[in-house]
Amino acid sequence: MTHPPYLSPAYRSSVLRAPSRPPVVLRADPDAVELTGPVFGHDEVGELDADLTRHHAGEPIGERIIVTGRILDAAGRPVPHTLIEVWQANAAGRYAHQRDQHPAPLDPNFTGAGRCVTDEQGRYRFVSIKPGAYPWRNHHNAWRPAHIHFSVFGTAFTQRLVTQMYFPGDPLFPFDPIMQSIPDPAARERLVAHFDLDVTEPEWALGYRFDVVLGRTPTEEP
Amino acid sequence: MNAVQPTPSQTVGPFFGYALPYDQGPDLVAEGHPGAITVAGRVLDGAGEPVPDAMLELWLGETGTRRALDRTGEGVSGFGRCPTGADGSYRFRTARPAGPYLAMLVFARGLLRSVATRVYLQDGPDPLLDTLDPARRATLVAEPVGEGTYRFDVRLQGEGETVFLEF
């Protein structure tokens, strides 16, 4: 199984929010609205939107990173011209969100939200800083591994995916109920980016590669 | 082509509010658009408490001429996004869809994967609705509460739990 079950009691917030009934499976209906999805124009996204280090007057504190990869469909074909949105904590593990109460410093030069549209080959590329781990109140001494949130559209509303990208070798993985909510270790591994020296730019930024594979739509041939 | 495996879902978490919502995101049509309707309601958890950190997305089936993100252009956009307020409430201004329903996705802290549902603007013969018992069927039909205004609550769990869909 790829996805986590809705009810994953170690992740406390799921307990009252997980649906208790199984979803109703819709038989293939070629007219279903959900088999299509919104198209976003490249010109709706600003050139700088994909560089999270350049949204303010100064440079953010932290380890500069490049995150790049491809969005693929279930058959491994690139998904061009699809919108990707990312958001993340700053290098100290603090979100620029008013409800984040973690007593770590905000960075006036880092908001931590970006977006881009994939190119013809389904590729995307973000420049950012490596987010910090942060504590949360799920259980005693709970810490989230460093991660970047990804929101991806694809070509059908049924492919819509929100997920989190993690960084290789993080010692917090075994203790994180959100990552561990995914039952299959191989599936969990697919959320971990790969360090890539070819993406890394000398004297400037570390490079990570992260591909996203969307689910199959009901009418799509495997 | 190498075999590929799908990427697992993870929760949207509690801190998307500064990143994903955008100006006029809930307005698929501009104010005063002829025939515009309002679809509004609340997202509730298994204890009947409001969910203040959910986000809903609406899809009409066509991208349209009003743009989805920067909201320039005239007419209708097929896509909208609305975060819930402190009382779990949301509100979309939209055009009527071509068919009987609007597609809706719900994201929230605590939801490890989004849930998909449909907002039917009226009850009637329908391939999906007709498979549901009356109580469950009713969870997908919005309640008209005034001129061009529909109420549609999303109950994530428990009594009156909204019908969620898998494709």
Image (cartoon, grey):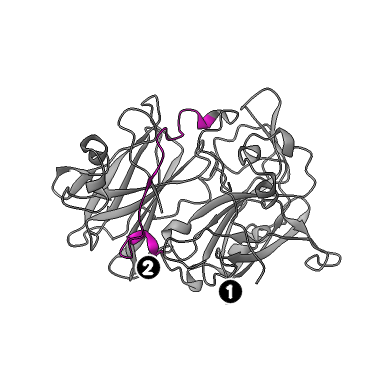
Secondary element under disc 2, as helix, strand or loop, is loop
| Outermost right residue | A203
* Residue A64 included in the magenta stretch of the image: no
Name the residue at 28% across, 48% down.
B119
Q: Amino acid at mark 2?
A: Thr
Relative to residue B139, is residue A222 drawn left or right? right
Indicate the secondary structure of the residue bearing disc 1.
Answer: loop
Q: Is residue A14 magenta?
A: yes
Pick whichever, A59 or B159, lies toward us. Answer: B159
Q: Picture coordinates of residue B85 (x, y %)? A: 39, 38
Check the image and name the residue furthest to the bottom: A120
Q: What's the residue at 70%, 38% (across, down)?
A: A105
Q: Amino acid at mark 1?
A: Asp
Q: Magenta region: which residues? A: A13-37
* Image: A150 above or below A101: below
Relative to B110, does residue A113 appear above or below in the rendering? below
Relative placement, left or right, of A54 versus A219 is right
Is the residue marked by circle 1 packed among few (<14), some (14-19), or many (20+) residues within 10 Å?
A: some
Residue B83 spot, x, y in % from top left: 42, 45
- Tag 2 residue: B72
Badge 2 and badge 1 both on one subunit:
no
- Principal SS element in the magenta part? loop
Disc number for residue A119: 1
How many numbered marks have been drawn onto this rendered protein structure? 2
